[in-house]
């Protein structure tokens, strides 16, 4: 074809979306999980004690905490049930390991609908390499899903 | 690591799974498997094309 | 033979003026595409590339994923 500099982005649009990259198109204005997830969710490490984390989570006004490593890769989750455990226990023992996580580009309407169907209070949103973007709360997902949004345009 | 024996069927495809991949519960009445969930949430290939990509 | 690049490679090349081409069908392109990308469905790529693209600039093609 006469083109000498041709590159193939092999991982494709899915990779771009999963990493939260900006997009254009008719669905660009629709809110997605990554925009609604709360990046200020408390986090903790495996070696901490539950008692310390309980106090920190309570002081921050939350009822959940995400367990991450130094690269902010999600390792586990502490929801209300786990946070009510023995304060002396280590996080590694108290947490719910390997929770289901979801990508930033997932439409918020879809997440809201499923979180209601499955009675899920919150869900970790991560990049395709497992790094925490934030915790999506069902209340936030439902509120955003029912808000009018721009039908077409850019999303950055 | 030993996986638990399958206890529930995927509501979309019927495959036996040990817990719902959306909410992690083994007793979820609307349990869904990893593949069906991925397709539903547009995390997997939405449809195959002639060239497969 | 196109050279394979990753996401950072795409960003770098676009900053340097590369042209982005999505080869998926039109309805998928319309729904969402990388900023600035043009749509040349695969079956029309050879026929239309020369008229739509600048052969003096790098071209980055992409699809849905690596499947």
Image: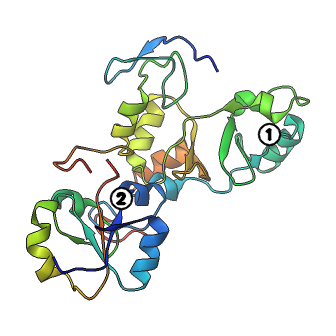
Q: Secondary structure at mark 1?
A: loop
Farthest residue, direction right: A88
Label 2 vs label 1, nearer the camera: 2
**Which percent across, then down, holds residue C25?**
17, 58
Q: Nearer the viewer, residue C50 or A154?
A: C50
Can you say whether A1 is above or below A49 in the image? below
**Which percent across, then down, holds residue A113?**
40, 38
- Check the residue under mark 2 and report the chain it is in: A
- Check the residue under mark 1 and report the chain it is in: A
For the rendered model, the colour scheme is: rainbow
Tag 1 residue = A46
Quadrant location, the N terminus of chain A: bottom left
How many other residues sit within 10 Å of disc 1, few (<14), some (14-19) or many (≥20)? Answer: some
Can you say whether A141 is above or below A85 in the image? below
Q: Nearer the viewer, residue A69 or C46?
A: C46
Residue drawn where x is 57% and y is 36% of the image: A121
**N-terminal-most mark, 2 or 1:** 2
């Amino acid at each position: 074809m006469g083109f000498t500099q041709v590159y193939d982005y092999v991982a494709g649009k899915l990779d771009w979306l999963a990493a939260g990259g900006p997009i254009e198109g008719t669905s660009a204005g629709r809110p997605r999980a990554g925009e609604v997830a709360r990046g200020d969710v408390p986090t903790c490490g495996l070696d901490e004690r539950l008692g310390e984390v309980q106090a920190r989570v309570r002081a921050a006004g939350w009822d959940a905490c995400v367990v991450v490593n130094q690269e902010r890769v999600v390792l586990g989750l502490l929801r209300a049930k786990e946070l009510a455990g023995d304060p002396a226990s280590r996080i590694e023992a108290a947490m719910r390991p390997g929770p289901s996580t979801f990508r930033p580009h997932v439409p918020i309407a879809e997440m809201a609908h499923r979180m209601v169907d499955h009675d899920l209070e919150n869900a970790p949103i991560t990049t395709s390499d497992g790094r925490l973007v934030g915790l999506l709360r069902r209340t936030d997902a439902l509120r955003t899903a029912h808000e009018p949004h721009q039908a077409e345009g850019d999303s950055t | 690591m030993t996986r638990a024996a399958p206890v529930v069927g995927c509501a979309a495809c019927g495959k036996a799974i040990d817990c719902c991949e959306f909410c992690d519960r083994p007793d979820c009445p609307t349990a869904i498997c990893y593949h069906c969930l991925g397709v539903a949430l547009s995390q997997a290939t939405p449809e195959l094309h002639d060239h497969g990509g | 033979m196109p050279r394979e690049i990753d996401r950072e490679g795409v960003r770098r090349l676009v900053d340097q003026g590369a042209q982005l081409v999505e080869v998926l069908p039109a309805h998928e392109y319309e729904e969402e595409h990388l900023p600035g990308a043009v749509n040349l469905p695969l079956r029309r790529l050879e026929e239309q590339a020369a008229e739509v693209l600048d052969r003096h600039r790098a071209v980055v093609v992409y699809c849905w994923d690596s499947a």
